[in-house]
Image (tube, rainbow, N blue to C red):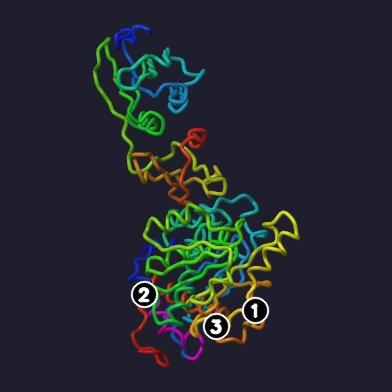
Amino acid sequence: MSGLITMDDLSNEEILSILDDAERLLPVAKGETYLPLLQGKILGNLFFEPSTRTRMSFETAMKRLGGDVVNLGDVKTSSVVKGETLFDTIQMVDGYTDIIAMRHPRQGAAQYAQDAARVPILNGGDGAGHHPTQTMLDLFTIRQAHGTLEGLKVVLAGDLRYGRTVHSLSHALIRFGCELVFASPSLLKMPAEIVADLTNHGAKVVETEALLDSLDDADVVYMTRIQKERFADEDEYAKVAGAYKLHASNLDGAKENMIIMHPLPRVDEIHPSVDATRHARYFEQAFNGVVARMALLCRLLNIEVPANIPGGEA
Amino acid sequence: MSQEHNMRRVTAIRNGTVIDHIPAGQAMRVLEMLGINKRTSVPVSMVMNVPSKKMGTKDIIKVEDRELTQDELNRLALVAPDAHVAIIRAYSVAEKMTIELGEEVTNVVQCTFTNCITTNLREPLPHRLKVVSREPLELRCHYCGRPQDLEELVHNLL
């Protein structure tokens, strides 16, 4: 395995084994144990478009494992504004680092970078394309809550059209036999080619506009933000967005172990009243970005995560 | 109308390349894909929409004094995958060639997705489209993974 560009780069066995590594690395991610597995290694953070969680969690993951990070910095002040090609930027950073984490506004940029680089590339989002490290932390969060990824009923809600997070996650979940419910306004439906792709792979997929009717038998509810700018006028937005807001009072009929996830940032789609319920998992999910990325960094750098880590689960 | 009659619509060539069984109406596109244009100095003849037993109607192109290479001909896989190609030397067929569609179409056309990284033509890596299905022809960009609209694709010749 060279880099991680899409979830297709990982077999189900590899996914589960990386999640196992992540599980054992939890005390390291929390700072309870120091384990400098990546000492002497340098991560190049190449974020050509804004990112808070992904960039910071890559940086934290690297540093918790004793490694170091160099940053491209603000694109506006980098050589990119002078017209440097991605190919040239990669040639340079490839020489400085052992592994690269990258986000780019253009789709296909991560694969392009991997073809241009000698070091592994971790795709941190390419346009509306893929975001596999987010998928790995999402899978980690789901498995942490349910003990398995197999056969769960997962509701994905909100903006399913433009959200690369939900696209990557859907593809990964059906590989574990999950049943998917896509709840979105018609304007923001999951693209037809993705639905076709999923059902061609034998997935059970239900599409609906009624989020609240789908909650009771769900194991996971994955919320996403509906962006105002997708709508022609504010009234239409307000009308639609209102139907995709979760309040604690909507959760009375939910299964006890149902979890609510969100890639964050949230705006109004999850009311703060939900935060205190046993279902809320979005902040743990954001933290899990560190541990999942730690496990991925180790795997791509061919560094074995020890079977026993002090403070960790054997 | 016979095959012979078709061939007589334009004179036999002494040396060069004959491309037969081009789908009717695609000859202009074939010329474009081969880079044959007003700057080309060798004689080129073309017949369009002539009867064909196999295809109903077809186009034929004859390029004199130029033997097209296999690489050049393979570019035609997108518009004339079943074309028959003959290299002519001293008025006879010296060699028959077929157009081969490999696993990938490299540096022939550019991905049709407007937000693909390869739309920046200054990026130096090759334009690569993977052949995911031959019947019907289905191509996906190696980089962005988007399926390609074949109608749109032929306007994206490199």
Please give the label number shown on residue A46.
Answer: none
Relative image position of residue A98 (x, y in whole percent): 45, 67
Q: Earlier in the sequence, mark 2 or mark 3?
A: 2
Question: Which residue bears the numbered disc 3?
Answer: A279
Residue displayed at 43% across by 72% down: A296
Splitting the image into 4 quarters, where does residue A275 fall?
A: bottom right
From the viewer's perspective, is residue A159 above or below residue A40? Answer: above
Q: Chain of mark 3?
A: A
- Is residue A209 visible from the viewing direction of this image? yes
* Other-residue count near label 3 (Cα within 10 Å), few / some / many at <14 / 14–19 / ≥20: many
Relative image position of residue A86 (x, y in whole percent): 54, 53
From the viewer's perspective, is residue A167 above or below residue B70? Answer: below
Same chain assignment for discs 1 and 3: yes
Q: Is residue A21 magenta?
A: yes
Please give the label number shown on residue A16.
Answer: 2
Q: Chain of mark 1?
A: A
Please give the label number shown on residue A247.
Answer: 1
Q: Chain of mark 2?
A: A
In this orientation, which residue lies closer to the viewer: B48 or A231?
A231
From the viewer's perspective, is residue B83 above or below residue A174? Answer: above
* Other-residue count near label 1 (Cα within 10 Å), few / some / many at <14 / 14–19 / ≥20: some
Of labels 1 and 2, the one closer to you: 1
User: Which amino acid lies under the numbered mark 3 shown in the image of this protein?
Assistant: His
Splitting the image into 4 quarters, where does residue A5 fall?
A: bottom left
From the viewer's perspective, is residue A205 above or below residue B61? Answer: below
In this orientation, which residue lies closer to the viewer: B44 or B40?
B44
